[in-house]
Amino acid sequence: MRILTLAMALALFGIGAAWAQAATYSLTGMGTGVMGTSKCATYQIIIDVTVDGKTVKGLFKQQGRPERAFAATLDDKGAFKTRADVGEGNVMDVIGTISDKESRILLDGYCKFEGRLTRIS
């Protein structure tokens, strides 16, 4: 009789796929100002983040502006950092952390959008 490893048994019964499902997070919030701007506090943004293994993919939509995307890779501490193209050669820094304790994100550019990400699945 052959000995099945745990990984082989999980794969055989399709259980491993359930453990590997992507997690989704969301934040809806207002902006805060950066030097030289006064309108940021009136800007609302929706940020959606999906984490699948170490792959992070996100979308954000500020009222009145097109939807933008970003992608990053989680490091061993659950942190990520990348840049998002916001058009006309401009970018926003995207910095975040995904963990069991707390998940947060910061979009920093023409305004700052920052807050706690709420896990939705």
Image (spheres, rainbow, N blue to C red):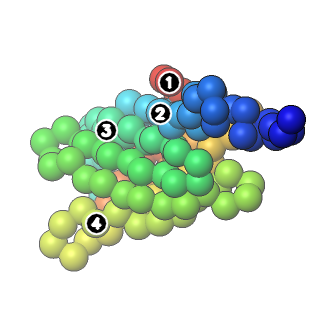
Amino acid type of the residue that numbered disc 1 sits on in the rendered structure: Ser
* Residue sitting at the far top: 120
Which residue is found at the position 67% from the left and 61% from the top?
Answer: 75
42, above or below 82, in the image: above
Q: State the separation of the CA atoms marked 1 and 2.
A: 5 Å
Amino acid type of the residue that numbered disc 3 sits on in the rendered structure: Ile
91, above or below 12, in the image: below
Q: Earlier in the sequence, mark 4 or mark 1?
A: 4
Quickly name the residue at label 1.
121
Which residue is found at the position 68% from the left and 51% from the top?
Answer: 78
Which residue is found at the position 56% from the left and 34% from the top?
Answer: 17
Quickly name the residue at label 2.
24
Label 3 near label 2: C-beta < 8 Å?
Answer: no
51, above or below 79, in the image: above
Amino acid type of the residue that numbered disc 2 sits on in the rendered structure: Thr
Residue 111, image x and y in percent? 35, 54
Judging from the image, what secondary structure is the residue with disc 2 in?
strand
Residue 34 appears in view: no
Judging from the image, what secondary structure is the residue with disc 4 in?
strand
Q: Is residue 9 left or right of residue 36?
A: right
- Quick one: label 1, few (<14), some, or many (20+) residues within 10 Å? few
Quickly name the residue at label 4.
85
Residue 53 appears in view: yes
Q: State the separation of the CA atoms marked 4 and 3.
A: 16 Å
Label 2 near label 1: C-beta < 8 Å?
Answer: yes
Q: Earlier in the sequence, mark 4 or mark 3?
A: 3
Which residue is found at the position 19% from the left and 38% from the top?
Answer: 63
